[in-house]
Image: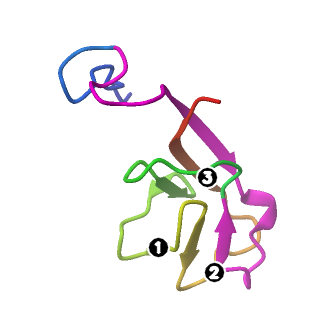
């Protein structure tokens, strides 16, 4: 079982020094969109820079396996197949 990192970059548990707004972790499930031809996926909210983790069938994808296009879009060079489980976990600013 993984242990969550509850500390920010300054070693505390609150909002990081200099951060304008609090961050919320978001999970998007794209499994229903996997069809063997779709390669580009759009998150439901803007992704905080550097926080996107993409999981295909439970395996975290490396930067060489996906391309981050902008604040909301990422792309695979090879499309996920029908029946694959595709999830994105990322931070977004709290509204």
Q: Which residues are magenta?
A: 14-42
Q: SS of the residue at dot 2?
A: loop
Residue displayed at 65% across by 76% down = 40
Q: Which residue is mark 1?
A: 66
Q: Which residue is mark 3?
A: 87
Nearer the N terminus, badge 2 or badge 3?
A: 2
Residue count near mark 3 (Cα–Cα under 10 Å), binned few <14, some 14–19, many ≥20: some
Q: Which residue is mark 2?
A: 79
Mark 2 touches mark 1? (CB < 8 Å): no
Nearer the N terminus, badge 2 or badge 1?
A: 1
Whether residue 86 sits left or right of residue 6 in the image: it is: right
Depth check: give the residue in front, 45 or 67: 45
Residue 42 versus residue 36 in the image, above or below: above
Q: Indicate whether residue 27 is drawn in magenta.
A: yes
Mark on residue 15?
A: none
Whether residue 7 sits left or right of residue 67 in the image: it is: left
Residue 67 versus residue 14 in the image, above or below: below
Residue displayed at 53% across by 85% down = 77
């Amino acid at each position: 079982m993984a242990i969550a990192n509850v500390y920010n970059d300054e070693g505390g548990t609150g909002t990081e020094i200099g951060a304008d707004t609090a961050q919320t972790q978001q999970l998007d499930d794209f499994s229903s969109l996997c069809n063997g031809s779709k390669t580009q996926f759009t998150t439901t909210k803007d992704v905080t820079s550097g926080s996107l983790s993409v999981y295909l069938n439970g395996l975290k994808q490396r930067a060489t396996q996906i391309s981050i296009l902008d604040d909301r879009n990422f792309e695979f060079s090879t499309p996920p197949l029908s029946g694959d489980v595709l999830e994105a976990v990322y931070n977004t600013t709290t509204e």
